[in-house]
Amino acid sequence: MTRYLAPLLFGLIGAGILVGLGLWQMQRLEWKQAVLAEIESRISGAPEPLPTMIAPEEQRYQPVELDGEILPGEVRVLVSQKQIGAGYRIVSPFRTGDRLVLLDRGFTADAFKDAARRIGPAHVTGNLHWPDDRNSATPENDTKANIWFARDIGAMAETLGTEPLLVIARSVAPGDPNIDPLPVDTGGIPNDHLQYAITWFSLAVVWLIMTAYYIARLRKTGET
């Protein structure tokens, strides 16, 4: 009987560790869901005035409602949309009161990249954002060809002569027929904790099965 004790303990301890990791991931899942719910609530909250002092962490996702004027000029940020393909985010200067800010108007398909844009008076609802588009694999922007690979707020503001403040539109009225808003949402925030938990629990089951198989082999060899 003692010959089975070591592999049994090894199996139970290993499975216990794997189950513990799975439970930890379930706790992380609950935490992440609460964070996402808070962000969603922030995104859809009551509009607030444009900040005079920029504090990205405090003002991220801040909802805004602006009346003003879309001015000529644009930056095109290369993106891709499912079932549509390649296209561009169109970022234009927007004047509201005595402020001049960046307005991410949304997506236009590659076929309409050179189309005339509607400019002039507009009512905008949207959210402030400081997107994390750039990583170590992101190419440098081709500003001469007006092909940007990331929404680099400082560089876009310098190019269009605005404040380094980006409003991502949820709606623009009147709209442009060739531009569909791409509003801020939580879709780009990873939440893989459930998959991780399932993986750890599955490994625990496999570990127990392997332990049982090993003990069965020990019994068989002992009987022979």
Image: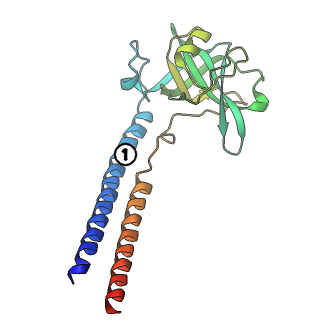
Q: Quadrant of the C terminus?
A: bottom left
**Amino acid at the residue labelled 1:** Lys
Q: Is residue 182 above or below residue 105?
A: below
Q: Residue at x 42, y 60 (%)?
A: 199
Q: Residue at x 33, y 82 (%)?
A: 218
Q: Nearer the viewer, residue 48 or 104?
A: 104
Q: Which residue is mark 1?
A: 32
- Which residue is farthest front? 224
Give SS at disc 1.
helix
Q: Nearer the viewer, residue 15 or 138?
A: 15
Tell me residue 39's x, y (percent): 40, 37
Q: Is residue 156 above or below residue 19?
A: above
Q: Residue at x 44, y 50 (%)?
A: 192
- Which residue is farthest left? 2
Query: Does residue 216 appear to the left or right of 154 in the view shown?
Result: left
Tell me residue 20's x, y (percent): 29, 59
Q: Nearer the viewer, residue 36 or 20?
A: 20
Q: Quadrant of the N terminus?
A: bottom left
